[in-house]
Amino acid sequence: MGQGPGPSGPGDAQTPPAGEAALDAWLETGAYKAWTCESGPMSPRPNGAHGRNRVCSNDLAHTNSGGEYAVGAASVKELIDSGTQIVGYAVSRHIKAGKTADSWYWYEKLNGQVNADGIGVIGCSGCHSAAGADSSHQGHDYVYVQVK
């Protein structure tokens, strides 16, 4: 799934922790809902693999002005069924300086199944590396949706 469970630490209001148990507990607190979030569920985006979702960006991601994201920049994507029920989450966090796959921690859990949990996860970084690659791929630096 990647290069291990990712950076350690319990996380805080602006920083999601790594690893299934810690991250699931952190997500349950709803801390990310105080971040800058989209107003509601969005239809699947072009080139998107997550279906209906709503993205929330922490302060470091939210204030990025186009260059490399700061270490600690993070987003939480609520994965939503055809109604309004959250059925999973996709989380990313920039863990070290650089614009390479191994500078990002990725986590995805959908319908109780962990699909990604680690640094530089190929399934995540392979897709997200195209962010900003051309006019059909919005975003930059492995981030497609930056909520401002």
Image (cartoon, rainbow, N blue to C red):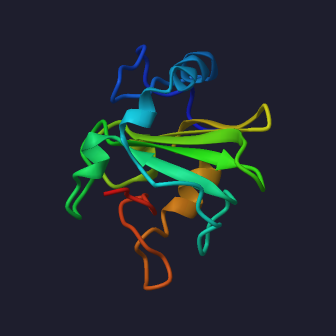
| Residue in the picture at 43% in, 18% down | 8
Identified at 72% across, 42% down, the residue is 85
Q: Quadrant location of the C terminus?
A: bottom left
> Exactly how many numbered labels are in the figure?
0
Quarter of image, res 118: top right
- In the image, residue 71 above or below residue 48: above
Residue 20 x, y percent position in the rendering? 63, 23
- The spot of residue 54 in percent (x, y) is 55, 52
Point out the image quarter for the N terminus: top right
Q: Quadrant of residue 43?
A: bottom right
Q: Is residue 47 left or right of residue 99?
A: right
Of all residues, the one furthest to the bottom in this rendering is 135
Residue at position x 34%, y 40% in the image: 58
Q: Is residue 27 above or below residue 135?
A: above
Q: Residue at x 60, y 38 (%)?
A: 2
Residue 97 seen from this side: no
Q: Nearer the viewer, residue 46 or 84?
A: 84
Residue 15 appears left or right of 42: left
Using the image, determine if residue 93 lies above or below residue 137: above
| Horizontal side of residue 46 vs 120, given as left or right | right
Q: Position of residue 51 (x, y in %)?
A: 70, 60
Is 13 in front, or is 131? Answer: 13
In the rendered structure, the answer to whether residue 44 lies left or right of residue 11 reads right
Q: Is residue 4 visible?
A: yes
